[in-house]
Image (cartoon, rainbow, N blue to C red):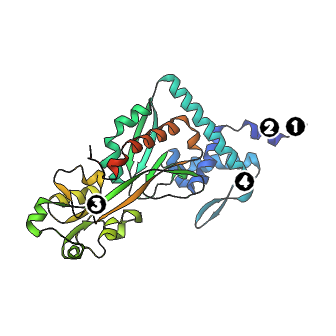
Amino acid sequence: MADPRLDAIGRLGWDDLRFVLEIARQGSIYGAAKVLKVDHSTVTRRLAHVEHVFERQFFDRSSKGISLRPDTEAIVAHIRQMEVHALAMRDDLVAASAAPRTVRIATMEGLASGYLARRIDSIVDDADETRIALFSNPHIVDLLKKEADIFLSFFNPQIPGLISEQVGEIAVYLYGSKVYAEAHGLPKTIDELLSHRYVGYIEEMVTIESVMWLEELVPQARTVFCSNSIIAQRNAAESGTGLAALPVFVGEESASLFRVLPEKLTISRPVWMSVTRDQHLIKSVRRMAKAIASVFGRDATMLMGQTRWS
């Protein structure tokens, strides 16, 4: 005789189960509601329905939020695989209809505005029939919460569930302008660095330590202007406010800036690209990741400041 409960579970649709998955991913009812674009009462109702059918509670609730119960982790893992197949099916349907599939790329402002935005044409050509949504974020993006499909950073996240690979390396130099040189001169030796003025990041707002390149190039630098925007830092350096430590794709695009003590003052940062293991199975995401890696490969010598920037 068939088990009525198993029959009921078999009739549950993806539209119900995705609520459970998003709650597990976001760690709260309100977080899931925001992602799913519904009110929190709808999420609560759908969760209650799934728990009733399975005859078990999926989450433990505490003052710290919601956490998945150990005895339901295997079930949610199956639901996650359902999502992968649903996304793959949508990918194939979108490809068949010739409508572009959007892939969301997240990275820091400098990489987004100073580099990737200038290479979008090449990336689109390599990842045909895919639309790119590029957004800059000063914080670490949580791919496991689906805040983006691809994350580019200057560090290896080393988070379980992610596939991360180093796709490139960028050089950072100290830059100055003619305006600054005329007003304050330029350091001719390392010993003269501390007598000059600098622009840099607002230290208390930095969440990604790898961008603290000024502190590495010029320890105890006297900063007269700080901003959480690297573009603002470059603009301030152009106006003569101070010297600035900038990655080449930000510093070299300015005709007003030049490298200061380039043979003695240079550091590098690796560029890591990360996707979740689930998203890596999606054809459009995998193709986009390959296109991004290809662009970094072609620009390798320019990104290290060894050939002229173009």
- Dot 3 surroundings within 10 Å: few (below 14), some, or many (20 or more)? many
Q: Position of residue 290 (x, y in %)?
A: 48, 39
Q: Please identify, in this view, whether the residue under mark 2 or under mark 3 is nearer the observer.
A: 3
Which residue is disc 2 drawn over?
A: 7
Where disc 2 sits, the SS reads helix
Which residue is disc 1 drawn over?
A: 2
Tell me which numbered mark, 3 or 1, is placed earlier along the sequence: 1
- Alpha carbon distance from label 1 to label 4: 23 Å
- Alpha carbon distance from label 2 to label 3: 65 Å
Q: Amino acid at mark 2?
A: Asp
Which residue is disc 3 drawn over?
A: 173
Q: Position of residue 257 (x, y in %)?
A: 18, 56
Q: Residue at x 50, y 58 (%)?
A: 156
Mark 3 vs 4: CB contact within 8 A: no
Tell me which numbered mark, 2 or 3, is placed earlier along the sequence: 2
- Alpha carbon distance from label 3 to label 4: 51 Å
Which residue is disc 4 drawn over?
A: 72
Q: Residue furthest right?
A: 1
Where disc 3 sits, the SS reads strand
- Dot 2 surroundings within 10 Å: few (below 14), some, or many (20 or more)? few
